[in-house]
Amino acid sequence: MQSKGMLDFFKNRNKPVSVLDFLEHSSYDDLIEIDLNENRYKFVYNVADKYYAPVTAGVYSEFYRYAADHMIHPDDAGFYADVMNPDTILQRMAEEELRDTFEFCFRTTDMKKGWRWIDSILLAGPRHGLPKGIIRCYIFDIQNIKDREEGLTLVAREESTLLLDPLTGLKREKDYFHSVEELLKAHPEQKWMMVVFDIEQFKMFNEWYGREAGDMVLARIGAGIRKDAERTNGLAGYLGNDDYSMFLPAGSLQMEELFNNLHKAIMRYGVSVGFLPAIGVSYSKEEDTVMRLYDEASLAMRNAKTNFKNRIRYFDPSMYTKIASDYQILSDFQSALKNNEIIFYLQPQCRASTASIVGAEALARWVKPDGTMISPLVFVPVLEKYGFIPDLDKFIWEEVCRWLKSCETRGLPLVPVSVNVSAVDIFTFNVPEYIQFLVEKYQLPKKALKVEITESACADDPEKMQAVVRELRNNGFMVLMDDFGSGYSSLNMLFELNIDVLKMEAHFLHMDEDTIEKGIHILESIVYMAKSMRLPVIVEGVENQGQKEYLQSLGCQYIQGYYFYKPLTIADFEDLISNPFNVDDNGFVFIANEEFRVREFLNDAVYSDAMLNNILGPAAIYSWDKEDVDIIRFNHKFQEAVDVPDFSERLERIQRFMPPADRKLMYSTMEKARLDRMNGASAVMSFGRVDGTYSRFWIHFYYLDEAEGRMRFYGSARDVTELTNLNRHMDLLSRFLSECVIFQVYNHGIYSFRVAAQGLEQEMQVSREELELELNSGKFIRRIAQKDRKRIVRLGVNAIKKKEDFSATFTMNLADGNTKDFLLKADMVEDPISDVKCILSVHCK
């Protein structure tokens, strides 16, 4: 009989080739390939000892007749022979709603000489990715489904497919829970398990791989767990988005097996940890309810999401205790904000040589009315977990500004205070805008408030963090990177973020006898490399004089820790700074250490350390005799960056692979580095590839020493080929245009701007990069004269709605106080590849 089942998902799809992809990764029992061109067949895959198949390859016209006579149930044999007739099979498949497919069910002989229901899906033709004349036949065991239809199992088969989700083939949420409730009531003696799972970050999966791929994963998961449920006398349901549930007899399905099957559905796209499934399980108890089981399994699943190693969690009552404790903290915290129980302490940041205070860090504290204190280690992680950390941060920031203003009013020294910014803050609201608002509200100088961002926050979204740091620094605020060395950062990140001060923990000095030497090497390498970027370093957690003196010997000028001061109450801090001899108002400045020891990087124990390689990035030691430049040592990162097949042949006389102009540039840069031993010198240079094109590297040289007429240099390298090509193209475009060209982009529900060329840089007095930043931050509107703002915005909004071109004149306020008239022309476009919706061009009138 013809079946309506697995292929329904594809009926209205525009990409039929995905049917083959779906079937190839499904759990079929047999796969038979039929070649009508040669009248041959073969079993590509065959489940052992299940179905009767005496010959697995041979002449197809003989096989299909033998099967109809000896392998197919007599009641189904006629239909089978009619469908599988080699003379008509392709014509029949071409007439189906989903062309070149056919799905039908029949009974076949198993190895015990009994009958077993199977679902057969036929696929043919180029539209499904197969050569002309080739048919693939996928065999699925559906005996459990037939048993359900005949009432032979605990769970009856759903008669109407109208109640099933068309994407997954599963019951929807309401119907699923109703069926679970009926099953629970009908079999109270049976012990059940409720399973709830979803795929982590599935929305991002859709963005990366497309909605079509996401639907395919959901459909494949639905087909798999439906089969598992039917095999185990259970139920499976689709709860929307990427959420699923199963209700099964306890122990009938191993969760590790379920996890592996779910993981396979995702892993075929080449992804891993970011999209792992999370599974929660709860077991039924006497007189249990469906929703209680579901809530317990859901809670277990949420716990599974917090651990990348253990993604299967079984409900435990202690989970409720933990969540109840968290909710109590959240509730008490809201009251604490209103009742002034949340305050801040200040921990001084001191100059190591004099112990004078150059700044302080604001640290949140929770003090109850009875004087007891709740540790930040207790409440801060809960606020972060549930997304309430911005409430705390905003409160502390404003309290700090209020206190700083009071210090100014009372004539106390205005010691700069740094406030902490979390990753949640960055993604929740506009941090630079809010901090700007606070200093304007309390009329504070920008230097009074510093911003600390953590290394982990930078790693979450480097591009977002770059934009935030850039805007903060453009607005005049000092930015510190906190906890550097605790995660996976590199100095490339510091270079790209362009921060002002580096903060690192002294935990490398707190190691045992077996690891202290490694800790010292790591600490030294970070400090030395920070010096190369002229970054002041603050070391936190310094507890004794020995640590302080050692850090001073490395050139660390600033210390924060119990050795000088613990976190102080506002009153104690004010007493401290009321004595002007305790305060150094010079702030954080970089002072070069005269004993800067570049030679430390030549120590084998340090140079071979993998962590140091990551910090250094691509690096090498160069030898120069005023003619030839040779590379005499290099690290693995350098070899990866150069990435040419004849790498070993390029280590000698490297100038051979450079254009003549760049050879001179390299020689002059090395000479500058020799003359400025402390700071070195850098330049961007081109090196030929094997295919005749050029790679461009930014190399910073430091002079080391000279022996036997050859000078040695340390050089850190960075591949900037793409960046320099892009800049050259942009500069060239701007040079020959007398207009500004802007792309308006619509992506994932958000409009943004890309400045393709800024031919009006001189007239507008703003660079391409600065213009793009102004447009995306909303500040560009301030450049338009007040009289024209509403009109220009109205024209733009109407044009987007109606998809119509428009042009308009407007007056722009220039930086020197003058105004100038410009003509704006907007052309609406539809470019799904680049997401460009409008091209704006601006001309001088």
Image (spheres, rainbow, N blue to C red):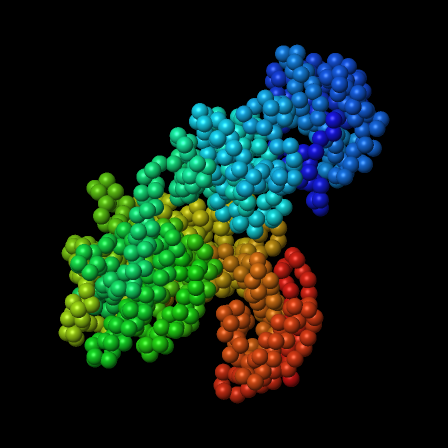
Is 280 located above or below residue 338 in the figure?
Answer: above
Image point (21%, 42%), residue name: 513
Can residue 140 be seen at all in this image of the molecule?
A: yes
Foreground residue among 567 and 677: 567
Is 63 located above or below residue 661 in the figure?
Answer: above
Foreground residue among 820 and 9: 9
Q: Quadrant of residue 473?
A: bottom left
| In the displayed structure image, the side of residue 408 where residue 614 appears, left or right | right
Residue 325 at x, y = what percent?
30, 48
Q: Quadrant of residue 733?
A: bottom right
Residue 519 at x, y = what percent?
27, 47
Foreground residue among 549 and 597: 549
Image point (79%, 20%), residue name: 78
Image point (51%, 58%), residue name: 720
Residue 446 at x, y = what percent?
34, 74
Image point (40%, 42%), residue name: 299
Residue extending farthest to the bottom is 818
| In the displayed structure image, the side of residue 206 where residue 438 appears, left or right | left
Is 789 located above or below residue 634 in the figure?
Answer: below
